[in-house]
Structure formats: C-alpha cells, structure tokens
Amino acid sequence: MRNIASILMLWYVVSIHGATSTPFQLVPDPTDCTKFSIHMLKFKWEVSCDAGKVFSRKISNCVLQNGPYDDCSNRQQNQPSITIRAYEDVFNYCAQCPTCLYPDANNCAGFYNCSKILVPVYSRFRQFEDECVYPALFDADALRCERDYKKVEGNCGGRPLLLYPCDQKRFKCVVAHCRPCEVTYPNCAGKSDGFHEWEDPNISPYFTRCQDGRTIKAERCDPSGNGTPSLFSCPKPMCRCRL
C-alpha cells in the first residue's frame, strides 16, 4: 500500500502548485477484487491490496475479505440482473446502484462500471463505460472479465462478439497523430489457427498468431546475431535471415 501513499502525495504536491484542480479517482478492477486503479488526468496506476484484503467500492479502501465491508467477493448476489441497451439508461441504473456492474448489450466485452465516475483526459470511454482487455469477454453472470473467452462466448445472450481488436473502443484513436490500430494489429478474420504473415507488406519481419478468428499476438522477427534483418515466412512459420 506504500504505492498509494506515494501517488496521493504526488497528486497533493501537483495540486498545491496549481498544476491541476482535477481530483483523483479509485476504480475497482472488474476482474480481480484484490486490485484497483488510481486515475488522475490521463494517468493510471494499478494497485493491489495486501494479502487477505479486497477493495471496497463503497468506502474506496482495502478491507478484510468476507468482512463486513467486503462488497466485492459476492457482488453478483447484490445487484439486479440487467443488461443496458442504451448509454442514456446507465445514469438511472447507476443512480440506484452506485457500485454495480452492468453488461453492455452492444458488445460482449463491454460493460458499465457505476464506480467509474470520472473520465481521464483523452479517454476512449464515456462516464461509466468500460471494456475488458482483449480478448477477454464480460461474464454477465459472474460480473467480471473472463480471460478465457471460450467460457463466455456461447453465453453472450445476443451481445455482439467483436473478434478484431480494432473494433473495440479501447483501440480507437481519440487524439491527433495516433497510431492507427490497423497498423498495429492485423485482422485474423477467415484465417486458420496458427501463425500468419501480415498481408501488407506481404514479405516482412511482421507476423501474427490467430486463434478462433482473433488476433492473439502481433510481433516482428528479431534481427540475427550479426544484425542481419529477419523475415517471417510461411507455410513453415519461422523467422529467417535475409540473405
């Protein structure tokens, strides 16, 4: 917990020097009850509670797991089963339950986090909006992000599956001079499982690993020991030195 004190001290110093009047916000991790993040301006710090403790949404602090203030471990038992279909509706639901998580009807990886009140500068998300880190999907029953998407994709309840990373909000450009997502992640739609060359350019050091139509990995071949550039070649997926 020393990291929290250091971060809050930094915020205090910046504030008294007039650099910012923006408050910080503590946001629970949607996947792990023992973790939360501190948001201030465009910055974000990941923090873990001490052993045997979880983060409480109501009092914004780490508390004893299964103790009287633990509102995370049994979260799914404490909120209504609702899927939000329009962004405008989230304000009414979050007013009734400020600690709830609600599935997004328009994205199987998306959800609304009622504890996420403040929005960082240049954020891709509006107030309360959030999204599981690709390729995880939001489990509407357990109310958490599930890294093993196969456990959830058959139970999305009509919520669309966005297989391509660039279709998700967290990869959208919101500022000028942003590196387009399509340059970073090739599309695995229609490709077999395994390693593939990037389509453009066709012969390059860049390659990707596809799984179930998803872009699981996008990397490039390292140069050889003597600095000679390497190219990725298929059908035998491997990096080869350019002669």
Image (cartoon, rainbow, N blue to C red):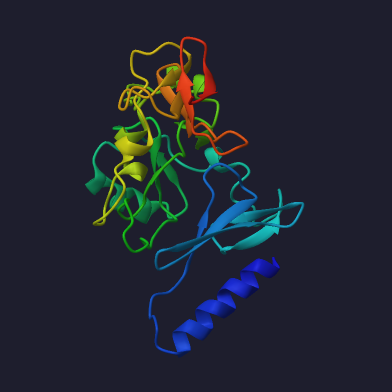
In the figure, is residue 102 to the left or right of 88?
Answer: right
Is residue 168 visible in this depiction of the protein? no
Name of the residue lying farthest toward the bottom: 17
Q: Please give the count of numbered marks on the rendered protein.
A: 0
Position in image of residue 125 (x %, y %): 32, 51
Depth check, front residue: 98 or 45: 45
What residue do we see at 43% from left, 74% from top?
Answer: 23
Report if residue 59 is visible in the image.
Answer: yes
**Quadrant location, the N terminus:** bottom right
Residue 147 lies, with reference to residue 102, above or below; the image says above
Q: Which residue is situated farthest in the right direction here?
A: 51
Q: Report x, y in % for residue 75.
A: 56, 43
Quadrant in which residue 104 is drawn: top left
Question: Which residue lies at the image location 46% right of the left edge and 18% below the top edge?
Answer: 233
> Relative to 173, is 64 on the left or the right?
right
| Residue pictured at 30% horizontal, 33% vertical | 167
Residue 52 is left or right of residue 117, and the answer is right
The percent coordinates of residue 170 (x first, y second) are: 36, 44
Q: Is residue 233 above or below residue 50?
A: above
- Counting from the top left corner in percent of width and height, residue 123 is at 33, 56
